Amino acid sequence: MNIAFSKSPPSTSSRFRNRSMQSGATLVEALIASVIVVLFLAEMYYANSRGLAMLKFSRENTVVSNTIQTRVEQIRNSTYTQITDPAYISGTNSLGAAIPSQIPLRQFTETIDVNSYPLPSGYPGALDASTIEVKRNSDGTVTVTGSGNGTLSSQTALQIDFKSTWTADSNGVPRQRQCSIIVSSQGIAGQNQ
């Protein structure tokens, strides 16, 4: 004869007690989960804002690079005599004309310096008697800060420095880009006379 013993079902009170210990969340656990979610969202916000700042910085650099490249092309398309004339550089053929890509930059200024090449000894970037310096201010006005002494046209080569400065949109930090080219009085195969 086989006698089977069966376990009696647990009482209602013990079943309730086991269930509450296993499936319930305490207040401390809920707070820890909330803190983790808040930290995750804050990090996502920070990463997004840094990404947007880098995008603005990249856009500003692209605008300035394009502006400098346009100014270099304007000078390359000029004759040697025109390059050594401050009135020409400040006129509508060069700095006198605005480039449409300048619009999104704050406090944007451009400067073109024309010096003899090789540079005078001890040239620290300051103007000497023969230097031509023309500046386009952020309000669009063009000023000749150095008109030279008229000797640049007799030089065999010139160094032309293009400098752009602006204030960054993202953090208000002053920025600067610069490019220099060397131009010969003979131009490319004597074409630029």
Image (cartoon, helix red, strand yellow):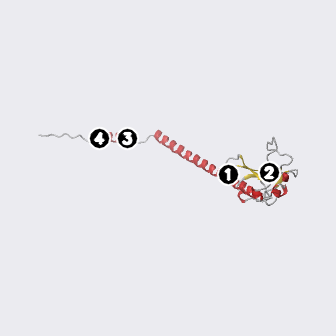
Q: CA distance from mark 1 to mark 4?
A: 75 Å
Query: Can the viewer see residue 90 in this picture?
Result: no
Numbered tag placed on residue 89 in the rendering = none
Q: Secondary structure at mark 4?
A: loop
The residue labelled by disc 4 is 11
Q: What residue is shown at x 60% (from left), y 49% (from top)?
A: 51
From the image, tell me which residue sits under label 2. Answer: 157
Q: Is residue 79 above or below residue 28?
A: below
At x 58%, y 49%, the residue is 48
| Disc 4/disc 3 C-alpha distance (Å) | 17 Å
Q: Earlier in the sequence, mark 2 or mark 3?
A: 3
> Label 4 is placed on what type of residue?
Ser
Q: Determine which residue is flagged by label 1.
A: 61
User: Which amino acid type corresponds to the residue marked 2 in the rendered image?
Assistant: Ala
Give the image location of residue 143, x and y in percent: 83, 53
Q: Earlier in the sequence, mark 2 or mark 1?
A: 1
Is disc 2 surrounded by few (<14), some (14 to 19) or many (20+) residues within 10 Å? many
Query: Which residue is labeled 3 in the image?
Result: 22
Q: Residues within 10 Å of mark 1 (few under 14, many from 20)?
A: some
Q: Nearer the viewer, residue 29 or 83?
A: 83
